[in-house]
Image: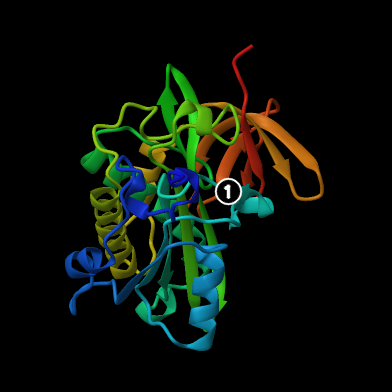
Amino acid sequence: MTPPDPSAAPSSPWSDLDRPPLSESGLRRSLVRGDGLWSALDVLPRTGSTNTDLVARASAGTVEEGAVLVAEEQSSGRGRLDRRWSAPPRSGLFFSVLVKPAEHEVPVSRWGWLPLLTGVAVATGLSAAAGVDTALKWPNDLLVTVAGEERKAGGILAESSGAGGIVIGVGLNVSLRADELPVPGAGSLALAGAQVVDREPLLRAVLRSFERWYGQWCAAQGDPGLSGLQETYAAGCSTLGRQVRAILPGERELVGEAVAVDGDGRLVVRTADGDRVPVGAGDIVHLRPA
């Protein structure tokens, strides 16, 4: 009798014991409760983009504020400027959340703080749960240090879902090994020496951290100063104090020192002429010292 071909056996989420699947029921029990932010939580085995899926659900009116959508694998994850984000199954955290700041009387002018708030929530949650420092690159990159080098381990993308809703997506490399990195400059929590790479406690910690920061921010009607968000973001932002090149809409460039994040969440760049220019949108490149 010919022995069975192992490669023909059906794949199982448990075939890689270093990357076990998430427990949807366990996450719901620990996070979804009547007096909290999180109203629903679903885990998908695979999808194109959790942001796209959750925007569709929100637009159809089938979910409320606090809905969370998690994917074990994303095939078409997106970042800013429509950049693609992909990783092996169960190697990272890929999730989106729905918030409705208008229901908490937060002015639209302050909604631009939501990606920065998410960055603070992820960084503080990971610091407590994984014992790893995660720095923030303005406006929405999550950085870790690998062998003394700053590397991108995650990103954040916020999109409107209509009717006052905002969907915020997070992609974070957790257990990626060096040979699995999509680009040489990428990183992961594992490569940064994280004490914990079990995704379930990490996701719980990040979502609880987001719930706390979002609650403070809404209670202050989105005021970044009163909520403590502006100070905490600045303390964890590796862009501040650096020479940067801002690539602005229309292919314009601005070079100078990043000196502050203002009350509108904009990066303030001081040019060689001493002008302080607020940057509200653009791609930021950290320049190495001459």
Q: Is residue 275 left or right of residue 52?
A: right
Task: Give the labeled residue for mark 1.
Answer: 85
**What is the residue that sits farthest to the top in this orientation?**
290
Q: Is residue 14 left or right of residue 245?
A: left
- Mark 1 residue crowding within 10 angstroms, few (<14) / some (14–19) / many (20+): some
Residue at (53, 74) in percent of width and height: 55
Q: Quadrant of the C terminus?
A: top right
254 in relation to 59, above or below? above
In the image, residue 63 lies at what x, y percent?
Answer: 41, 82
Total marks shown come to 1
User: Which color mode does the image show?
Assistant: rainbow
**What is the residue that sits farthest to the front in this orientation?**
1
In the image, residue 102 lies at what x, y percent?
Answer: 43, 78
116 in relation to 127, above or below? below
In the image, residue 269 lies at what x, y percent?
Answer: 61, 36
Residue 103 in sight here: yes
Q: Is residue 246 left or right of residue 227?
A: right
In the image, residue 157 lies at what x, y percent?
Answer: 54, 57
Residue at (70, 28) in percent of width and height: 273
**Residue closest to the eye, 49 or 286:** 49
**Residue closest to the eye, 267 or 63:** 63
**Residue closest to the eye, 213 or 187:** 187
Residue 240 in sight here: no
Q: Is residue 124 left or right of residue 192?
A: left
Considering the numbered disc 1 on the image, is that residue within a helix, a strand or a loop?
strand
For badge 1, the amino acid type reads: Trp
Residue at (46, 54) in percent of width and height: 170
Question: Which image quadrant is residue 95 in?
Answer: bottom left
**Residue closest to the eye, 192 or 133:** 192
